[in-house]
Amino acid sequence: MRHRIAVIGGGPAGLTFARVLRRHGYPVTVFERDPAPDARPPGGTLDLHEQLGQLALDKAGLLAEFQALSRPEGQAMRILDTDGTVLRDWRPRPDDRANPEIDRGRLRDLLLGTLDIRWGRTVTQVVPGTSDGALVRFADGRQEAFDLVVGADGAWSRVRPAVSSATPHYTGVTSVETALDDVDTRHPDLARLIGDGSLAVYGVNRALVAQRNSGGHVKVYAQFRAPLDWHTNLDPADVEALRSTLLALFDGWAAPVLELLRHGGTFVHRPLHVLPVSHTWPHVPGVTLLGDAAHLMPPLGAGANLAMLEGAELAESLAGGPDDLDDVVRAFEEQMWARAGRWAKITTAGLERLVSPDPAEALALFDQVQPS
Ligand SMILES: Cc1cc2nc3c(=O)[nH]c(=O)nc-3n(C[C@H](O)[C@H](O)[C@H](O)COP(=O)(O)OP(=O)(O)OC[C@H]3O[C@@H](n4cnc5c(N)ncnc54)[C@H](O)[C@@H]3O)c2cc1C
């Protein structure tokens, strides 16, 4: 196989695709919008499932390194009532490797390895079916043609319009993210409250979730139902105004829980958008999608896992499959759509239950997923 293959986006999907393809000895060009790997904060922690993300890392030959870098103890989950009562306190067995956590930055570095990435190359459009193949247009005015362009450019994909008119829509749930550093030394009470993994508190139509990353870093997510424009009257630079607004939203919750919101130095607004459940498209020769670009869903522990497995599977199929790219990609798409559709249904229903008018729904969901 000596096809010209490009992947747009150096996230979990694109990097896993490139790593596995390269492991099989095939060249691939990765275009990434960020100017450098550390151009922006890498984000929080990801749990990688044995049958999804970890399987993808195995296909990339990186499972042993992942096991050394990941935090199995990070699977721990504590759920509190809004009055601070501990409702569940689940801890993994020491040998439990079902869903260990890894910092996104560490995962990115692991996948990057010695891959050659074209940094700072923002794609604006992909035009399939030109006489020279699929044409990739860049923000800097350049363009390049390939036999296959793989869109792994996330939620707001610029590749997606080449195959589908679908766009993400707002779920009605928004998330505001803040973070604590050196939690064990600077906020020891909070460190104890959070434990080794995640802490979640579910109230009426709102939730507070804290997740431990490595190095005493904790990400805190305040999630609630609100109109998309709920914050238009707030100055994003006015941290104290944002803090007071959030504290008012969670008014009446136990004081130790509210401490999670009192110390963060910045608040990042992330309204949760999704693509339609079971998003598919009529196959377009020379272009396909992976990960969030194909099936953006609520952030309930599946998106990066699916993105990575899809990247690994498409790469393996291209390396081992027939020479006809289209046959390989068609078969891959059918498989991706079926699995992603199942997960989109699960995570969409999950979000409804986690940020719900009846907080007992969240607890029932946890008991279903993690029976004691
Ligand atoms: C708070 C939160 C917690 C989450 N936790 C988990 C979890 O525990 N487990 C899990 O499996 N999933 C989790 N997810 C979901 C997960 O983050 C995503 O599903 C995953 O990152 C998707 O990977 P991707 O490679 O498809 O897209 P992305 O990670 O979005 O990567 C896309 C890449 O493409 C680049 N790019 C974008 N546009 C362009 C362009 N025009 N040109 C060139 N490059 C471009 C971007 O810079 C980026 O590097 C979480 C999500 C959130 C928001």
Image (tube, grey):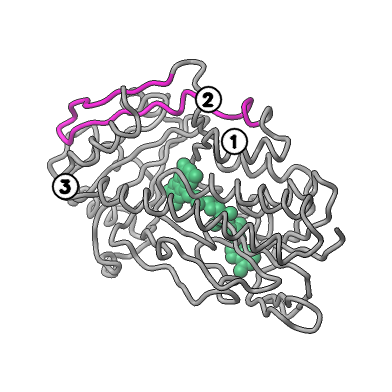
Q: Position of residue 114 (x, y in %)?
A: 79, 45
Find out if the beta carbon at label 2 lies less than 8 Å from the nearest ligand 1 atom. no
User: Distance of mark 2 from mark 1, alpha carbons?
Assistant: 10 Å
Q: Amino acid at mark 1?
A: Gln
**CA–CA distance between discs 3 and 2?**
33 Å
Does the magenta-highlighted stretch encompass residue 23?
Answer: no
Nearer mark to the viewer, of 3 and 2:
2
Residue linked to disc 1: 54
Q: Which one is earlier in the sequence, the residue at label 1 or at label 3? A: 1
Residue 306 picture location, percent across and down: 54, 48
Tell me which corner region of the image, top left, top right, bottom left or bottom right, holds residue 68.
top right
Residue in the picture at 60% in, 46% down: 309
Q: Amino acid at mark 2?
A: Arg
Q: Residue at x 29, y 55 (%)?
A: 242
Instruction: Identify the mark at residue 97; answer none if there is no mark.
Output: 2
Q: Is residue 40 visible?
A: no
The span shown in magenta is: 66-92
Report the amino acid beneath label 3. Val
Residue linked to disc 3: 204
Determine whether 144 is above or below 247 in the image. below
- Between 341 and 119, the one lying in front of the other is 341
For marks 1 and 3, give the CA distance: 35 Å
The image's mark for residue 227 is none
Point out residue 10 in the picture as x, y percentages from the top left corner.
Answer: 65, 55
Q: Nearer the viewer, residue 240 or 24?
A: 24
Badge 1 marks a residue whose secondary structure is: helix
In the image, residue 89 lies in the stretch drawn in magenta: yes
